[in-house]
Image (cartoon, rainbow, N blue to C red):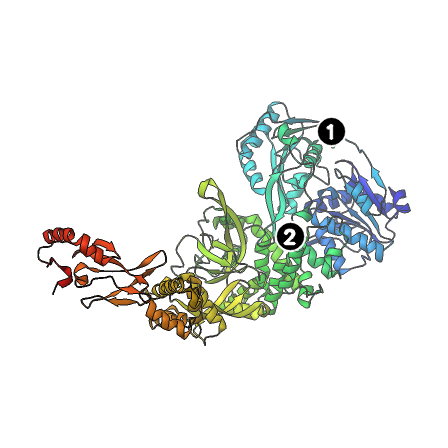
Amino acid sequence: MVEALRRTPNLVIEAPPGAGKTTRVPPALLDAGVAGEREVWVLEPRRLAARLAARRVADELGERVGETVGYQVRFEEAAGRLTRIRFLTEGVFTRKLLADPQLERAGVVILDEFHERHLQSDLALALLRRLQRDARKDLRIVAMSATLDTAPVAHFLYDCPVLRSEGRRFPVEIEHAARHDERPLEAQVQSAIARLLDEGLDGDVLVFLPGAAEIRRAQELCAGLAARFNLLVLPLHGDLPASEQERAVRPADIRKIILSTNVAETSVTIEGVSVVIDSGLARVAGHSPWSGLPALNVARTSRASAAQRAGRSGRTRNGRCLRLYTAQDFAQRPEHESPEIQRLDLAEAALELHAAGLRDLHSFEWFEAPERSALDAAENLLGRLGAIDAVGRVTGTGERMSGLPLHPRLSRMIVEAQARKVGAAACLIAALVSERDIRARNIFEGTQRPAARTARSVSSSDLLELFDLFMEARRAGFNAERVKSIGLDANTVKRVERVRRQLERLTGSEELKEELPDALETELLVSILAGYPDRVARRRAAVNNASAAGSIELQLSNGLAASLAPESVVRGAEFLVAIDASERREAGRGGRRAGRTVVRVASAIEPDWLLDLFTDSIEETAETEWNPLSERVETVRRLMYDDLVLDESRTSEAVNDEVTRKLAEQALLAGTEAFVETEAIPLFIARLNFVRRTFPEKDFPVLDDGDVRACLAALCEGRRSFAELREAVRSGELLGALRQRLTAEQISLLGKMAPERVRLGRGRVVRVNYEDDRPPWIASRLQDFFGMREAPTIAGGRVPLVLHLLAPSQRPVQVTSDLTGFWERHYQSVRRELSRRYPRHAWPEDPLKAED
């Protein structure tokens, strides 16, 4: 190994768990002088691994941590001027690289457990390679892995050598569950431990569980076994105080049951472990698509992870692994977990790269490039937060943000809060958001609120409710029992307090005061908004009964719909910022599951704050719109934030071409029948068609519904409502527009040859009906035709009218155009029938001589 690094600047080491990579390689390189006068840095994926590795190496040197061997994790450092081996988390490393672009203190950088493919380890590898190529050709890079395919890493490091070591491994007997177990996970663990004890357990047991909640439940359920068999049941996870973590990994006088998350998969060996119980589950790092903050989701582990876990029992002796899942389940799992760079939010990494001087992140030489869409989303968010400009340069705000070990949303909030003199309060809010919910039962997972509540049952922010709960714990002196009595988790509260203090120190904020005045509370809410410019929402319904239970429908600034969770205290705000949300599946029609966005954490805002913070995102629009209720065209002026309407007013301004176009569009959609209340238009067209057929030599135009619609559209000019249009039609303007399509001669001929009405022999005037598929006809009582020898004619005598001769009941007794023939052949029989049915009417024998 040493000789390889003297010949080449880079090396990949592949060795199984327990081979001593973490604790043996760094001292060996230091002793061999590979780092020169500089330090050996070891990047670890977790804080716990960094602390434990540093303590183990320091113990082996017979020193205390902080002398030759030290460590540095988020908000914690144990190192001094004599430190030559430094264990640090990957996230801390990238920030140290920003502060010292040349890495003057590091001679060798070791990326431990690189097979886990954390986002920060991928980023560190790419940045180290870039630094080595450009400015630090003397820098040595070592990537160490237990299960990863080393070829791609070696190729990325300029085809460097790969050193493989089998290490010292003991055989491990692996046993899978015979069938799927439906019992709660803690019950399965208890049964497995009881079985081991019955079989004569020799050594300690390491149990892998997904998270702290599962560990607590298993610890409670196994308490009886512990008392009966004199066992120590100890938790091990990253959120525990260092003293409790140390207790779990140090040798003890009695047997231990160590209930651990996947922090125990890698790095230092836990002495005394002879059996591993593997749940096959872990909380896998992801991110909330809403807040962008890290999120842990329970998922099945990969086969590589299962091998790592099983190997923990065979590091110092023959081991045994009980897997609480079937062999078939194991065979169906992926070989490796997918790299974090393909599933995490990239905003924080993107800001770090920009702060390192990169402009175009798409051209950056990634070890494995992320999806372009994910990188573009990160860049877009940084731009909206004001961290980078249009060409990728870091702004002054961005420089201040990059100095904080937080997601850019939270760092932007703190930067804004400092300018508004509420930096200390914002540090607490950032700590509350970045850590787990301090409430013992998380209300945002559908459970009930704790019995102890603050006065903010209706409040301006869910974060202020958490703020108040934390301050109550602070007033209780963070006493575990008192904190628990108010419904909070004592360990989480303490973690929040540690993070808060570190953020105050980093930002130089003054000490947090007990009370936050109303005026400063407003400044804090504005600062929260600064971190979430793309999460603005407006409630759809009017603000009323704000304290009522139930969801409130929201319109988001991205144009989508959502609802505010009933558990949220932000019940009375019209405008708010959605800090965190989730997709909930609900049964829909046909049994389908429909997604619904539920805002779980919100904070109220005022529209004026948007004008103050995001002036460039505010747009004033004026659009011509149709109001279906008033049936008129209105000019709608809106103040827009993205796709969200902040303010709206409707006016009836001067008519212009757009108003005319919109009115005509709606009029044509409604149809001519919505405006033509009489039969004047259809009658006019039917008369015209009759004359055109009868007198083809006169070249009458063909008019149809299209012509009527065109004239109706023309009438819209100078008008803005249906009411005005109907009045114009009633006054004859539509008919006049149609008549203008005829010549004067044609209009005169139309009136003479196709009269609208004709006079009968006894003086009655009746309407002539014109239809395209039948001859013109009239209808009137039989008595009205007495004294007439022939049917009246039109078209200059060319066309006799068809007569509908009606009885007193207005029903036709005869339809004919031969009135003379009717009198001669049919009248007498009709007369007899009508005389019988209508005796009060006169039915003369001679209809041509009849008198009134």
User: Hey, which residue is sitting farthest bottom in the picture?
Assistant: 654
Q: Residue 728: x percent and y percent? A: 36, 72
* Residue on which disc 2 sits: 345
As drawn, is 206 to the left or to the right of 42?
left
Dot 2, crowdedness within 10 Å: few (<14), some or many (≥20)?
many
Q: Secondary structure at mark 1?
A: loop
- Mark 1 is on which residue type? Arg
Residue 323: x %, y % from top left? 63, 30
Q: Nearer the viewer, mark 1 or mark 2?
A: 2
Earlier sequence position, callout 1 versus callout 2: 1
CA distance separating discs 1 and 2: 41 Å
Residue extending farthest to the left is: 840
Residue wearing tag 1? 317
User: Given the image, on which type of amino acid does mark 2 rest?
Assistant: Asp
- Residue 173's tag is none
Find residue 528 and report its image quarter. Answer: bottom right
Frontmost residue, 830 versus 580: 830
Q: Residue at x 45, y 56 (%)?
A: 553
